Amino acid sequence: MSVISQALENKIAQVHGLLSKVAQDYPKLVFANSLGAEDMVLTDLIHRSGLPIGVFVLDTGRLHDETYQLLAKVQERYGKAIQIYYPNGEATQAYVQQNGINAFYDSVEQRKSCCYVRKVEPLKRALKGQDAWITGLRRAQAVTRSELPEIEWDEGNALHKINPLASWSETEVWDYLRAFAVPYNALHDRHFPSIGCAPCTRAIAVGEDVRAGRWWWENPESKECGLHIKAPA
Protein backbone atom coordinates (compact mmCIF):
# COMPACT_ATOMS: atom_id res chain seq x y z
CA MET A 1 0.00 0.00 0.00
CA SER A 2 1.29 3.45 -0.90
CA VAL A 3 1.13 6.47 1.41
CA ILE A 4 -2.23 8.24 1.57
CA SER A 5 -3.09 11.66 2.91
CA GLN A 6 -4.51 12.25 6.36
CA ALA A 7 -7.62 13.72 4.76
CA LEU A 8 -8.23 10.51 2.82
CA GLU A 9 -7.51 8.40 5.91
CA ASN A 10 -10.19 10.40 7.73
CA LYS A 11 -12.70 9.83 4.93
CA ILE A 12 -11.94 6.10 4.88
CA ALA A 13 -12.53 5.97 8.65
CA GLN A 14 -15.83 7.84 8.20
CA VAL A 15 -17.00 5.33 5.58
CA HIS A 16 -16.02 2.42 7.82
CA GLY A 17 -18.01 4.01 10.63
CA LEU A 18 -21.04 4.57 8.43
CA LEU A 19 -20.94 1.03 7.05
CA SER A 20 -20.72 -0.39 10.57
CA LYS A 21 -23.66 1.73 11.71
CA VAL A 22 -25.95 0.88 8.80
CA ALA A 23 -25.04 -2.81 8.98
CA GLN A 24 -26.28 -2.72 12.58
CA ASP A 25 -29.35 -0.60 11.83
CA TYR A 26 -30.41 -2.56 8.74
CA PRO A 27 -29.92 -6.34 9.14
CA LYS A 28 -30.89 -6.92 5.50
CA LEU A 29 -28.38 -4.65 3.78
CA VAL A 30 -27.07 -5.06 0.23
CA PHE A 31 -24.59 -3.27 -2.00
CA ALA A 32 -25.49 -2.61 -5.65
CA ASN A 33 -22.11 -2.95 -7.33
CA SER A 34 -22.01 -1.33 -10.78
CA LEU A 35 -18.28 -2.13 -11.06
CA GLY A 36 -17.41 1.54 -11.60
CA ALA A 37 -14.44 3.20 -9.89
CA GLU A 38 -16.49 4.32 -6.88
CA ASP A 39 -18.05 0.90 -6.46
CA MET A 40 -14.63 -0.73 -6.52
CA VAL A 41 -13.65 1.50 -3.58
CA LEU A 42 -16.74 0.27 -1.72
CA THR A 43 -16.09 -3.33 -2.78
CA ASP A 44 -12.66 -3.16 -1.17
CA LEU A 45 -13.90 -1.35 1.95
CA ILE A 46 -16.78 -3.77 2.48
CA HIS A 47 -14.49 -6.76 2.04
CA ARG A 48 -11.91 -5.40 4.49
CA SER A 49 -14.59 -4.47 7.02
CA GLY A 50 -15.86 -8.04 7.22
CA LEU A 51 -19.41 -6.75 7.68
CA PRO A 52 -22.39 -8.92 6.65
CA ILE A 53 -23.29 -6.91 3.57
CA GLY A 54 -24.59 -8.77 0.52
CA VAL A 55 -23.32 -7.76 -2.94
CA PHE A 56 -25.13 -7.91 -6.26
CA VAL A 57 -24.50 -6.83 -9.86
CA LEU A 58 -27.04 -5.99 -12.55
CA ASP A 59 -26.04 -7.58 -15.86
CA THR A 60 -28.05 -5.75 -18.50
CA GLY A 61 -26.90 -8.07 -21.27
CA ARG A 62 -25.19 -5.19 -23.07
CA LEU A 63 -22.19 -4.46 -20.87
CA HIS A 64 -18.65 -3.95 -22.18
CA ASP A 65 -16.32 -6.96 -22.34
CA GLU A 66 -14.02 -5.06 -19.97
CA THR A 67 -16.80 -4.93 -17.39
CA TYR A 68 -17.25 -8.69 -17.49
CA GLN A 69 -13.48 -9.11 -17.18
CA LEU A 70 -13.51 -6.93 -14.06
CA LEU A 71 -16.40 -8.93 -12.57
CA ALA A 72 -14.30 -12.09 -12.92
CA LYS A 73 -11.34 -10.35 -11.22
CA VAL A 74 -13.53 -9.20 -8.34
CA GLN A 75 -14.86 -12.70 -7.75
CA GLU A 76 -11.34 -14.13 -7.87
CA ARG A 77 -9.71 -11.50 -5.63
CA TYR A 78 -12.29 -11.18 -2.88
CA GLY A 79 -13.91 -14.59 -2.98
CA LYS A 80 -17.18 -13.00 -1.87
CA ALA A 81 -20.42 -14.33 -3.26
CA ILE A 82 -21.90 -11.93 -5.81
CA GLN A 83 -25.52 -12.31 -6.85
CA ILE A 84 -26.06 -11.43 -10.51
CA TYR A 85 -29.47 -10.25 -11.69
CA TYR A 86 -30.46 -10.36 -15.35
CA PRO A 87 -33.32 -8.68 -17.24
CA ASN A 88 -36.54 -10.63 -17.64
CA GLY A 89 -36.12 -12.47 -20.93
CA GLU A 90 -39.70 -12.05 -22.12
CA ALA A 91 -39.78 -8.33 -21.33
CA THR A 92 -36.45 -7.77 -23.09
CA GLN A 93 -37.57 -9.70 -26.15
CA ALA A 94 -40.86 -7.78 -26.30
CA TYR A 95 -39.08 -4.41 -26.07
CA VAL A 96 -36.64 -5.26 -28.85
CA GLN A 97 -39.28 -6.77 -31.13
CA GLN A 98 -41.57 -3.79 -30.72
CA ASN A 99 -39.00 -0.99 -30.82
CA GLY A 100 -35.80 -2.30 -32.41
CA ILE A 101 -32.45 -3.34 -31.00
CA ASN A 102 -31.15 0.23 -30.53
CA ALA A 103 -34.41 2.14 -29.98
CA PHE A 104 -32.87 3.97 -27.02
CA TYR A 105 -31.21 6.38 -29.46
CA ASP A 106 -34.60 7.55 -30.73
CA SER A 107 -35.87 9.45 -27.69
CA VAL A 108 -35.41 9.90 -23.94
CA GLU A 109 -38.64 7.98 -23.42
CA GLN A 110 -37.40 5.00 -25.44
CA ARG A 111 -34.06 5.06 -23.65
CA LYS A 112 -35.69 5.12 -20.24
CA SER A 113 -37.97 2.26 -21.29
CA CYS A 114 -34.90 0.22 -22.20
CA CYS A 115 -33.25 1.14 -18.89
CA TYR A 116 -36.37 0.06 -17.05
CA VAL A 117 -36.38 -3.37 -18.65
CA ARG A 118 -32.64 -3.96 -18.33
CA LYS A 119 -31.86 -2.21 -15.02
CA VAL A 120 -34.78 -0.89 -12.98
CA GLU A 121 -36.94 -4.03 -12.94
CA PRO A 122 -33.96 -6.29 -12.09
CA LEU A 123 -33.02 -3.85 -9.31
CA LYS A 124 -36.50 -4.12 -7.84
CA ARG A 125 -36.08 -7.89 -7.71
CA ALA A 126 -32.66 -7.51 -6.09
CA LEU A 127 -34.05 -5.17 -3.41
CA LYS A 128 -37.19 -7.14 -2.62
CA GLY A 129 -37.24 -7.97 1.07
CA GLN A 130 -34.19 -5.82 1.89
CA ASP A 131 -34.01 -3.10 4.55
CA ALA A 132 -31.55 -0.79 2.76
CA TRP A 133 -29.10 -0.66 -0.12
CA ILE A 134 -25.69 0.88 -0.68
CA THR A 135 -24.57 2.78 -3.78
CA GLY A 136 -21.36 4.43 -4.98
CA LEU A 137 -23.02 7.73 -5.91
CA ARG A 138 -21.13 11.00 -5.38
CA ARG A 139 -22.42 14.59 -5.39
CA ALA A 140 -19.78 15.73 -7.86
CA GLN A 141 -20.79 13.19 -10.51
CA ALA A 142 -23.71 15.08 -12.02
CA VAL A 143 -26.07 18.03 -11.65
CA THR A 144 -28.79 15.52 -10.75
CA ARG A 145 -26.74 14.42 -7.69
CA SER A 146 -25.49 17.75 -6.33
CA GLU A 147 -27.50 17.54 -3.08
CA LEU A 148 -27.03 13.82 -2.46
CA PRO A 149 -27.19 12.87 1.26
CA GLU A 150 -25.31 9.96 2.81
CA ILE A 151 -28.58 8.37 3.93
CA GLU A 152 -31.90 8.96 2.19
CA TRP A 153 -35.31 7.41 1.81
CA ASP A 154 -35.71 5.69 -1.55
CA GLU A 155 -39.39 6.29 -2.27
CA GLY A 156 -39.42 4.19 -5.44
CA ASN A 157 -38.17 1.07 -3.66
CA ALA A 158 -39.60 1.86 -0.19
CA LEU A 159 -36.35 1.43 1.72
CA HIS A 160 -33.32 3.46 2.76
CA LYS A 161 -30.44 4.15 0.39
CA ILE A 162 -26.92 4.64 1.69
CA ASN A 163 -24.38 6.72 -0.26
CA PRO A 164 -21.11 6.39 1.72
CA LEU A 165 -18.99 8.21 -0.87
CA ALA A 166 -21.35 11.16 -1.34
CA SER A 167 -18.73 13.74 -0.31
CA TRP A 168 -15.74 12.11 -2.04
CA SER A 169 -13.99 13.74 -4.97
CA GLU A 170 -12.88 11.90 -8.10
CA THR A 171 -9.27 12.42 -7.00
CA GLU A 172 -9.96 10.75 -3.65
CA VAL A 173 -11.56 7.78 -5.38
CA TRP A 174 -8.50 7.26 -7.56
CA ASP A 175 -6.07 7.87 -4.71
CA TYR A 176 -7.78 5.05 -2.84
CA LEU A 177 -7.76 2.64 -5.80
CA ARG A 178 -4.07 3.20 -6.43
CA ALA A 179 -3.07 3.14 -2.75
CA PHE A 180 -4.70 -0.24 -2.16
CA ALA A 181 -4.05 -1.68 -5.66
CA VAL A 182 -7.76 -2.25 -6.19
CA PRO A 183 -8.70 -3.69 -9.62
CA TYR A 184 -10.77 -1.41 -11.84
CA ASN A 185 -12.33 -1.36 -15.30
CA ALA A 186 -9.70 -1.07 -18.04
CA LEU A 187 -11.97 1.40 -19.85
CA HIS A 188 -11.14 4.02 -17.22
CA ASP A 189 -7.64 4.20 -18.70
CA ARG A 190 -9.21 4.95 -22.10
CA HIS A 191 -11.05 8.07 -20.91
CA PHE A 192 -14.28 6.38 -19.78
CA PRO A 193 -14.83 7.91 -16.31
CA SER A 194 -18.44 6.68 -16.17
CA ILE A 195 -19.30 3.26 -17.60
CA GLY A 196 -22.70 1.79 -18.35
CA CYS A 197 -23.99 -0.31 -21.23
CA ALA A 198 -21.69 -0.45 -24.24
CA PRO A 199 -24.04 1.27 -26.75
CA CYS A 200 -24.76 4.09 -24.29
CA THR A 201 -21.21 4.92 -23.16
CA ARG A 202 -18.37 6.68 -24.96
CA ALA A 203 -14.99 8.11 -24.02
CA ILE A 204 -14.90 11.79 -23.10
CA ALA A 205 -12.65 14.57 -24.35
CA VAL A 206 -10.39 16.72 -22.20
CA GLY A 207 -12.48 19.24 -20.26
CA GLU A 208 -15.78 17.40 -20.63
CA ASP A 209 -17.93 16.58 -17.62
CA VAL A 210 -17.26 13.11 -16.16
CA ARG A 211 -20.77 11.99 -17.11
CA ALA A 212 -20.59 13.43 -20.64
CA GLY A 213 -19.95 9.98 -22.10
CA ARG A 214 -23.20 8.54 -20.69
CA TRP A 215 -26.17 8.93 -23.07
CA TRP A 216 -24.12 11.64 -24.79
CA TRP A 217 -26.98 12.47 -27.19
CA GLU A 218 -29.17 13.72 -24.31
CA ASN A 219 -29.20 16.85 -22.15
CA PRO A 220 -27.45 16.53 -18.75
CA GLU A 221 -30.73 16.97 -16.87
CA SER A 222 -32.13 13.71 -18.29
CA LYS A 223 -29.06 11.55 -17.71
CA GLU A 224 -30.38 9.11 -15.14
CA CYS A 225 -31.52 5.58 -15.89
CA GLY A 226 -34.23 5.35 -13.25
CA LEU A 227 -32.19 3.60 -10.56
CA HIS A 228 -31.60 6.87 -8.68
CA ILE A 229 -34.60 9.10 -9.42
CA LYS A 230 -35.98 11.04 -6.45
CA ALA A 231 -39.71 11.38 -6.08
CA PRO A 232 -41.08 14.93 -6.56
CA ALA A 233 -41.33 16.92 -3.32
Image (cartoon, rainbow, N blue to C red):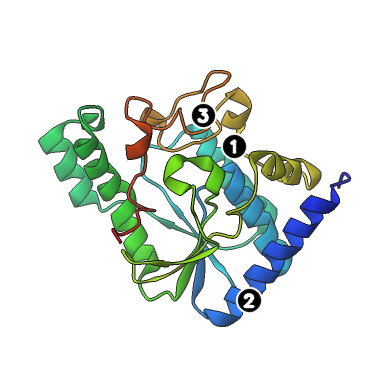
For image coordinates 84% across by 47% down, the residue present is: 4
Q: Is residue 41 left or right of residue 202?
A: right
Placement of 216 over or under 35, stated as above or below: above
Q: Is residue 86 left or right of residue 139?
A: left
In depth, the one of 40 and 13 nearer the eye is 13
Between label 2 and label 1, give the one nearer the viewer: 2
Residue 162, x across and y down, in percent:
52, 64
Residue 118, x across and y down, in percent:
31, 47
Q: Quadrant of the C terminus?
A: bottom left
| Mark pair 3, 2: CA separation | 33 Å
Q: Residues within 10 Å of mark 2 (few under 14, many from 20)?
A: few
Placement of 77 over or under 30, stated as above or below: above
Q: Residues within 10 Å of mark 3 (few under 14, many from 20)?
A: some
| Mark pair 2, 1: CA separation | 29 Å
In depth, the one of 115 and 213 nearer the eye is 213
For image coordinates 51% across by 72% down, the residue present is: 29
Residue 27, x across and y down, in percent:
53, 81
Q: Is residue 47 left or right of residue 53?
A: right
Judged from the image, the secondary structure of the residue bearing numbered disc 3 is: loop
Extreme-left residue of the structure = 98
Amino acid type of the residue that numbered disc 3 sits on in the rendered structure: Asp
Q: Is residue 76 visible?
A: yes
Label located before the other in sequence (3 or 1): 1
Label located before the other in sequence (3 or 2): 2
Disc 3 designates what residue?
209
Disc 1 designates what residue?
185
Label located before the other in sequence (2 or 1): 2
Disc 2 designates what residue?
21
Amino acid type of the residue that numbered disc 1 sits on in the rendered structure: Asn
Residue 137, x across and y down, in percent:
52, 51
For image coordinates 54% across by 59% down, the residue present is: 163
Judged from the image, the secondary structure of the residue bearing numbered disc 1 is: loop
